[in-house]
Image (cartoon, grey):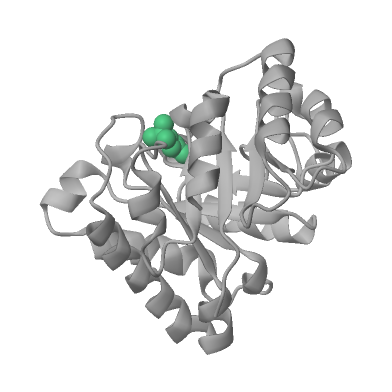
């Protein structure tokens, strides 16, 4: 089945309004009409509205970097799925390893956030991935599939979820996973979703790779059968690099 590639730029805690708008304009201008890939940008919350104005009507999508599990209430400092949709977001990153590492997002919380995103009409880009210690201990698949189960088991709306496999040791380190090693994990993720939700959903599921994706390694990664796109951090802050990754897709 032909899955449309998805290239998402995770700007993390970078770029104020002016820099965000400039970068978004450069990406929009560089994505040619013929491109097969779906492109999504995830600026900081404070720039969502301004970037929304740049991407509206262009086919480039907008994502939040995180979301709260409830739609509203006494949750100082949080942003909900309805608010993200209200500002024009189509997607939201959930369970990024930095959220898991620094902000206490465990599997149960990630599940609730995925459900909140779906309830709000957003596409969750739900992240899984092992640490270096877990990989060296031979626990990669245990960890990744455990995180995946928490996200995907008995999930209503699973057909709208995007999974991002991001080995923690490859994020922001310049240490990209070998394409064949990443493919092994992607295939295992798809197989597990097949067992959980059946062939149609597994065959349609988009599984992104993330972790030091750059213009010069994207083609090898995206050429793998089960790698359907990329979640890009550092290289998404540079329009030329990011566009090179989009072209590789
Ligand atoms: P990186 O980040 O491309 O800078 O490694 C990827 C991510 O954290 O999503």
Across and down, in percent, residue 153 comes to 51, 74
Q: Residue at x 31, y 63 (%)?
A: 183
Q: Quadrant of ligand 1?
A: top left
Against 8, residue 101 (above or below) is above
Query: Which one is nearer the viewer's eye here, 37 or 73?
Result: 37
Report the quarter where the N terminus lies. bottom right
Q: Is residue 246 visible?
A: yes
Q: Residue at x 12, y 50 (%)?
A: 136
Tell me which corner region of the image, top left, top right, bottom left or bottom right, holds residue 222.
bottom left
Q: Residue at x 73, y 49 (%)?
A: 33
Q: Is residue 95 visible?
A: no
Tell me which corner region of the image, top left, top right, bottom left or bottom right, holds residue 120.
bottom right
Across and down, in percent, residue 31 comes to 67, 40
Q: Residue at x 55, y 44 (%)?
A: 246
Across and down, in percent, residue 105 comes to 49, 43
Q: Is residue 13 found left or right of 211 in the rendered image?
A: right
Query: Which one is nearer the viewer's eye here, 25 or 188?
Result: 25
The total of numbered circles placed on residues is 0
Across and down, in percent, residue 74 comes to 78, 34
């Amino acid at each position: 089945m032909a899955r449309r590639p998805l290239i998402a730029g995770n700007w993390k805690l970078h770029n104020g309004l002016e820099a965000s708008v400039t970068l978004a304009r450069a990406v929009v201008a560089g994505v040619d009409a013929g491109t097969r890939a779906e492109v999504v940008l995830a600026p900081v919350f404070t720039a969502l509205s301004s970037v929304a104005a740049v991407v509206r009507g262009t086919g480039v999508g907008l994502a939040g970097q995180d979301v709260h599990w409830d739609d509203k209430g006494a949750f100082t400092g949080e942003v909900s799925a309805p608010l993200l949709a209200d500002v024009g977001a189509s997607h939201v990153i959930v369970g990024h390893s930095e959220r898991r590492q620094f902000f206490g997002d465990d599997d149960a919380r990630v599940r609730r956030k995925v459900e909140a995103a779906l309830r709000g009409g957003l596409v969750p880009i739900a992240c899984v991935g092992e640490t270096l210690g877990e990989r060296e201990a031979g626990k990669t698949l245990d960890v990744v599939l455990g995180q995946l189960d928490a996200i995907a088991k008995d999930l209503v709306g699973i057909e709208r979820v995007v999974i991002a496999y991001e080995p923690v040791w490859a994020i922001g380190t310049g240490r990209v996973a070998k394409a064949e090693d990443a493919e092994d994990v992607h295939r295992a993720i798809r197989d597990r979703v097949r067992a959980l939700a059946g062939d149609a959903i597994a065959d349609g599921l988009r599984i992104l790779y993330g972790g030091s994706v750059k213009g010069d390694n994207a083609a090898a990664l995206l050429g793998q059968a089960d790698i359907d796109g990329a979640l890009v951090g550092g290289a998404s802050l540079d329009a030329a690099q990011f566009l090179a990754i989009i072209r590789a897709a």
